[in-house]
Amino acid sequence: MSEPPVRPSRPAERLDPEKVAYWYFRLNGFLQIENFVVHPSRRGSQRTDADLLGVRFPHRAEFLLDHPEPMRDDVSTLRLSSQLIDVAIVEVKGNQPCTLNGPWTDREDQNVNRVLAAIGCLPHGVIDEAAARIYQCGTFEHEGYRIRLIPVGRAENPELAVRFPQVDQVTWAQILSFIWFRFHTYRRQKTQVQQWDRQGLLLKDLSDRSSGPEDFISTALSRMG
């Protein structure tokens, strides 16, 4: 009697680096736009796009009815502020070190100027000054706002650190470690998540199935390719 045919195993579902970054910033209270496009002034291809554009308010707190304190965000890694409205322009690299692409560092292109105008968080008369500072050092503060470039990648980039010492580079190990601890520390509050998108559910499933943070980080990195 012949044996039933063996069905090929389904390939492991891939994690999209931009979606992993999205969930990290979302869990830290950032309201976001994905793939924020800077359009040209005339007909033609787009000038550039920001992988993520996020805004976080200084009094953000995810309170729990059965917990004495709000959920802890990743304050040290992201240098989160309790005084400033945080505007983050996030550049995501999957298997590469943290990098800021030319559109965010080439002053002549004026892409930062256009993004600031499109966001609308600064008066028009301040945009050129703000863009100049962001091109120079990657961050700008004005009347309660902090606008900054945040690169995400596999590892910190020493050359980028020399050129932009005030820019906070965020690695996948830091991101995934925070996600694991958030899901496990608040696992009772994170049970009803059916409304999450597919990538968020995959992160939650991998976290639940992992033996610890190192196992989760290793598995997630392998799914990100």
Image (cartoon, rainbow, N blue to C red):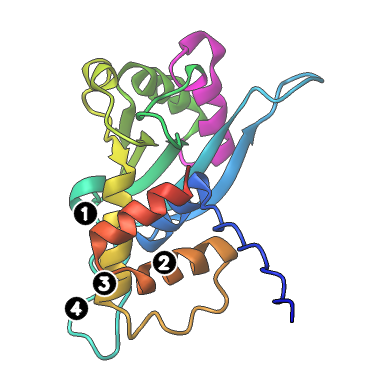
Question: What distance separates the C-alpha of mark 1 from that of mark 4?
Answer: 15 Å
Q: Is residue 80 in view?
A: yes
Whether residue 58 is visible to the viewer of this picture, yes or no, is no
The residues colored magenta run: 103-122
Q: Which residue is mark 3?
A: 71
Q: Foreground residue, 167 or 61? A: 167
The mark lying in front, picked from 2 and 1, is: 2
Across and down, in percent, residue 191 comes to 42, 84
| Disc with the residue nearer the chain's start (1 vs 4) | 4
The residue carrying mark 2 is 206
Secondary element type, mark 1: helix
The secondary element bearing badge 4 is classed as loop
SS under mark 3: loop
In the rendered structure, which disc, 2 or 1, sits on the residue that comes first in sequence?
Answer: 1
- Quarter holding residue 150: top left
Q: Secondary structure at mark 2?
A: helix
Where residue 75 is drawn, which disc sits there?
Answer: 1
Q: Are discs 4 and 2 less than 8 Å apart at CB?
A: no
